[in-house]
Image (cartoon, helix red, strand yellow):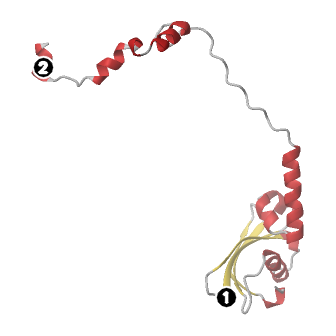
Amino acid sequence: MMVEQVDLRVKQDTYNPLFKRKEVSLEVEHDGAGTPSRVDLRKAVAAKFNTKVDNVYVIDVETSTGTQNAECLVEVYDDAKVAEQTVPKHIQTRNLPTEERKKAREQEEKKEEAKPKPKAAKPAEPKAGKTAEGKTEAKAEKQEGEGKEAKPKAETKTSEAPKKGKELESK
């Protein structure tokens, strides 16, 4: 799509001195064509605000179904270096032309492959000592091997229903 067909209307324009940028909300009319690409929008916004394309980042573009208008959030930075430090990497990647975007993704994949993967630590073997019940581990394992006979008394008490009132006094 060509940049000349895009009609920009500024809905809101605020300056953020902390990040040294203008935060602009735009309405873009794109009659007779699909939603403009982020690259085309960057060029059009840069021309409108008399700045370099490197200082402009399109954050969001939304077109409602069946309309020829798109709502955009754009950030126009005073300096490209500040923009590179502030704008998240995935937004920077989205604002690149398709060829450069593919190259950037390939470079990221190569970096990830080059990094050595940390080895998973083996779980530590429990040391022979006392368990919570005061038995040594060897005795606890022996009782587990014997089966149901080695159940602790606390479990059998919880299976009975609690007794109330006169039932408690009679026993």
Q: Residue at x 67, y 24 (%)?
A: 123
Where residue 16 sits, quadrant-wise, is bottom right
Which kind of residue does numbered mark 1 sit on?
Gln
Q: Residues within 10 Å of mark 2 (few under 14, many from 20)?
A: few
Q: Position of residue 42 (x, y in %)?
A: 81, 76
Name the one closer to the observer, 79 or 126: 126
**Left or right of residue 132: residue 84:** right
**Direction from residue 27 to residue 136 in the image, left or right:** left
Q: Is residue 121 visible?
A: yes
Residue on which the image places disc 2? 167
**Residue 130: x percent and y percent?**
54, 8
As rendered, which of 48 and 20 lies closer to the eye? 48
User: Which mark sits nearer the N-terminus, 2 or 1?
Assistant: 1
The N terminus: image quadrant = bottom right
In the rendered view, would you say 77 is above or below 31? above
Q: How many discs appear? A: 2
Question: Mark 1: few, some, or many residues within 10 Å (few <14, many ≥20)?
Answer: some
Q: Residue at x 73, y 28 (%)?
A: 121
Of residues 90 and 118, the one nearer the viewer is 118
Choose between 119 and 101: the one closer to the eye: 119
Which label lies toward us, 2 or 1? 2
* Secondary structure state at the residue bearing disc 2: helix
Mark 2 and mark 1: Cα distance apart in space:
81 Å
Q: Secondary structure at mark 1?
A: loop
Q: Residue at x 39, y 12 (%)?
A: 149
Task: Identify the residue at image location x=82%, y=63%.
Answer: 83
In the image, what residue type sits under mark 2?
Glu
Q: Quadrant of the C terminus?
A: top left
Residue at mark 1: 68
For residue 87, say whether it is visible: no
